[in-house]
Amino acid sequence: MTTVAVCQNKQKKVVFIIADGIPADVVERVQTPNLDAIAKEGRYMRAFVGGEKEAYSQTPTISAVGYNSLLTGTWVNKHNVWDNDIKAPNYNYWNIFHFLKQQYPIKKTAIYSSWTDNRTKLIGDSVAAAGNIHPDYHADGYELDTINFPHDKQRDFMHKIDETVTEAASAGIRNNAPDLSWVYLEYTDDMGHMYGDSREFYNAVSMMDAQVGKIWSAIKYRKERFSEDWLVIITTDHGRDEQTGKSHGGQSQRQRNTWIVTNCRNLNNYALYYQPAIVDIMPTIARFMNINFSEKRRREIDGIPLIGKVSIADMKVNYFQNNLDISWKALEPDGKVKIYVSATNNFKESKPDNYQLMEELPVNREHFVIDVKKVKSSFYKVIMEGRYNSVNKRSITAD
Ligand SMILES: [Zn+2]
């Protein structure tokens, strides 16, 4: 028990980095000594974006869409950012900045990014509907500064911006050590769009790796001098097409195939034996920072934490003739699972849903067929609540 107490005394700090548009095969092919050094402490994992293919949560493999899946732990059918225009984010699905500030107003947040929309629209800086939160530190807007960063055709300016973002993040971490930091690096995606699978794209990945190395140095500096426990997660927002590597947005395997690098050494069985998704990062950060979700918000989160105990994963729902055929994997055999069904989807308008408890059974049963004749609907939200986590799915009925 002593070790637990010591760990809990350390301040929890999180940095997540999105390096734009790098398929898993590319980050595995290019030499990335800094990512390797971080993965050596924790792990490199293949991951995925894009939601459930050809199902209700299918999500375009587009940048802002992916960032918001990370931030909210939900797919596009909920967070509603369908492309880079970010027209109408549904802030009822809170992002990790909102969750943190709600529970720990004193904790400090930061964003270091080339793309101002990441702060103003996705986090929702000072937006009432997004909780009126405000990142304590931000370094962004460089893409609008054509004097210091004149836009050249080769887009070298974007590499310079990423360098500036990296310097700001490193200095911020060393000097202020925000509790939650988001670093966003763009240049890799630019080179992917211009050159596809090419030396130029691979070079951009090497440059990104060096930038991650600088940020990692700042974190090591803090770890050596302060009683702080740092979680680092590096990932990408989408892969690229199989044919040329120039484009993305679709659902092919290479566009969906991504990766996660973390320094965390205590990953759970879900992380080790299933392919994690971008939506798993938010609940992982939340669990690390001791953020508690209220029941109604927990029920909407699509991700599963990669650390700590997990009761249920790999939930599947199939509707047939007034029945919901539900199956899952029990990753911890103890305890029961409660299955709730709602025929409403009021949460998206910030109103309560009418959940009915349909069944309670041992989690290790791993399957159950529910008769939903009494709750006739063309649409069901199905929630499974286990001892250590909840999962949810939707079912669109065929008849
Ligand atoms: Zn992107």
Image (spheres, rainbow, N blue to C red):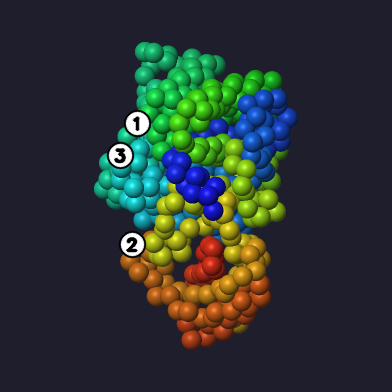
Q: Which residue is mark 2?
A: 350
Residue in the foreground of this view, choosing between 397 and 169? 169
Residue in the foreground of this view, choosing between 313 and 50? 313
In the rendered view, does 222 fall on the left or right side of 61? left
Which amino acid lies under the numbered mark 1 shown in the image of this protein?
Tyr
Which amino acid lies under the numbered mark 2 shown in the image of this protein?
Ser
Q: CA distance from mark 2 to mark 3?
A: 22 Å
Mark 2 or 1, nearer chain start:
1
Is residue 246 shown to the viewer in this render? no
Q: Is mark 3 within 8 Å of ligand 1?
A: no
Q: Which residue is mark 3?
A: 134
Residue at 55% x, 32% y is: 19
In the rendered view, does 130 fall on the left or right side of 41? left
Q: Residue 150: x and y, percent?
A: 42, 14
Q: CA distance from mark 3 to mark 1?
A: 9 Å
Q: Which residue is mark 1?
A: 137
Which amino acid lies under the numbered mark 3 shown in the image of this protein?
His
